[in-house]
Amino acid sequence: MKEDKVIGLILVAFSVFMYVQADRLPPAMFGALGADLVPKILFAVLAVCGAALIVQSLIGERKAKASGADSPPENAGGGGVLLKTKALIGYYQYVIFGFLAFLAYVILMYYLGYPIATLIFLPVIMWVLGPRNKKSVVVIILTTLGVTFIIYYSFLKLLNVFLPEGSLF
Amino acid sequence: MLELFALGFKTIFQPYPLLLLFLGTVAGIIVGCIPGFTITMGAALVLPLTFGMTSIQGLAAMIGVLVGGLAGGQITGILLGIPGTPSSVATVFDGHPMAKAGEPGTALATGTWASFFGGLISAGILMFFTPPLANVALKFGPWEFFSLVLFGLTIIASLSGKSLTKGIIAGIIGLIAASFGTDPMTGVPRFNFGLNAMAGGFSFLPVLIGLFAFSQLMSNLEKKEKTAAALIEDSKLTFSSSKIIKAILRQPFNLIRSSLIGVFVGALPGAGGSIACILSYDQAKKGSRHPEKFGTGIIDGVIASEAANNGTGGGGLTPTMALGVPGDAVSAIMMGALILHGIQPGPLLIVEFPDLVYGVFVAFFVAHFFMLVLQLYGIRLFVRLTRVPLYVLIPSILVLCAVGSFSIHNRFFDIWVLFIFGLLGYLMVKFKFPLAPAILGVILGPIGETNLRRALMTDSDLTIFVTRPISLLFLVLALFSVIWPFFQRYRQKRQTQKKSNS
């Protein structure tokens, strides 16, 4: 896979950065047995694996070229990058929306608390994802109220667990 | 021995644990039969709920999810040809043709009874092998434990994906996530980047829910389908249990072999139901007197696949209960539930908490009866549930993920952890990194680190790891599991070369 090269590079960079961080941990009382030992081993192995991923990806590309099977017509046609990005966003539009909606939900919950944030989040995301008709409006309203209060009640009363109350209140 | 089983019965046969076991089984069948929802996801979602329960109640609920999920995957597999979980992939081969030939009821009932028998056989093995295994493990020192953890991680890395490199990277990511926060040995804070909230590191609950549930929900948003499953006619779901039991028992060899394959594969870290059902289907075909009929809709195939995947349940629990090293992602989450309750899994568990360990055995056994009754008589209900539209299901579960992550420590930071690891998990799946090694890494990280450093503190001599025979055995196995994929590729290459030469 082509992306593997990039992922490998990111992994190597991340490992080097984190290795330096681990090196700054306070030294141990017993020689090499400090808090830094295991993280250092892990980041070293991760760096090696990242490098291996890059090498494997390069070998794979060379083989693909040698066998004449040039990468499929991804690069064919001018201005492909823009079209490709558009197609990708099209395919992943709901996923991207899902992550952003959840992000907004978390921020709302931080300020407004669980009940209000959920009463906003659920209908909005269901409205975007679901079909737009009278039946689904009823379904959305009922699910929103049902889920919000069942979770609220069961966590608070049955499981004695607190829910975010919101920093504004 | 007997009084210990009696103790287990006494622990489970109380109203609350029985109720939770039952509800867990219902939940398991539901996550099992909805394609795109996995058993691991179900277990990860139940995990925060167990916080408000006692440890045995929490475990009972999770065992219900495990058993129900392993059996529930066949429902959509048989009726739609889409396996509800990867563990039912091979059930589709013969189950779906049977349904198309007008016998969906017979196919489902055969699968359910085969799951039941497979589960009972694996429950028997779980009960009789765990105590002696734990007994052996009691003599383990930190060297053996470290080598065992290493073996567990390497074998899951090599078995769970196509690329060994990616498997190892996934495992390391899990280990690294676990290494943030306070050092288990000296109490030194690690990688908090000056943030107060990071002092305790990432708590593993939002990490697990993020990696396994959140990311999965997001993957489901890619598809254009509005419901998880299309309409199914449920008029033909009739069957005769007595005939089916007779038909299954007429193939004792197939049933027992498949169950044992399931148990064995399940006990290997990393290899779970999906590998077990295909392996056992393959063996059943090879051992059959009429292999050509496989794939056309015969019960032999359904029996092989379903007996094997429920067999993996007991197989996976055996090392978890005996050694504290989980055999698969679901038992890793169960270990997480124990750790949440302040109980350290390991060989001492059976000595210190016999009620808990034997309670788990009994719960696993009883869950199969619940599953049997639920799936034989409640099948129409579950079929209807698969029609709940995804646009309702996914947002509701997202809310549950957020609340569940928050509830353990009442820390808002944990919801951010959930989001970050959800994103990481989604990207890992997209770029074909297996998730199972990561989850094992998160759970095994602290155990491995503590034992490595304890070993080195006792004696800084590294050769002890290879001079102690059991430790050496695990290290050799670990090495073998790393080399094995290369060897296999080499052999395949030679075979194809031979073919092209001749």
Image (spheres, coloured by chain):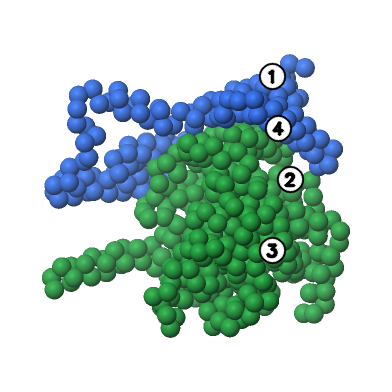
Chain colours: A blue, B green
**Residue carrying label 4:** A143
Question: Residue at coordinates 54% horizontally, 63% vertically from top-left?
Answer: B102
Whether residue B150 is situated above or below residue B173 in the rendered picture: below
**Residue carrying label 2:** B49
Q: Chain of mark 1?
A: A
Measured Cα–Cα span from mark 3 to mark 2: 28 Å
Residue B14 in the image: x percent, y percent? 86, 61
**Residue carrying label 1:** A111
Q: Which mark is residue B376?
A: 3
Residue B469 in the image: x percent, y percent? 49, 75
Measured Cα–Cα span from mark 3 to mark 1: 48 Å
The N terminus of chain B: image quadrant: bottom right
Relative depth, front residue between B261 and B188 = B261
Residue under disc 4 on the same chain as residue under disc 3: no
Q: Nearer the viewer, mark 4 or mark 3?
A: 3
Q: In this rendering, would A100 be left or right of A17?
A: right
Q: In this rendering, would B354 be left or right of B416?
A: right
Measured Cα–Cα span from mark 4 to mark 2: 21 Å
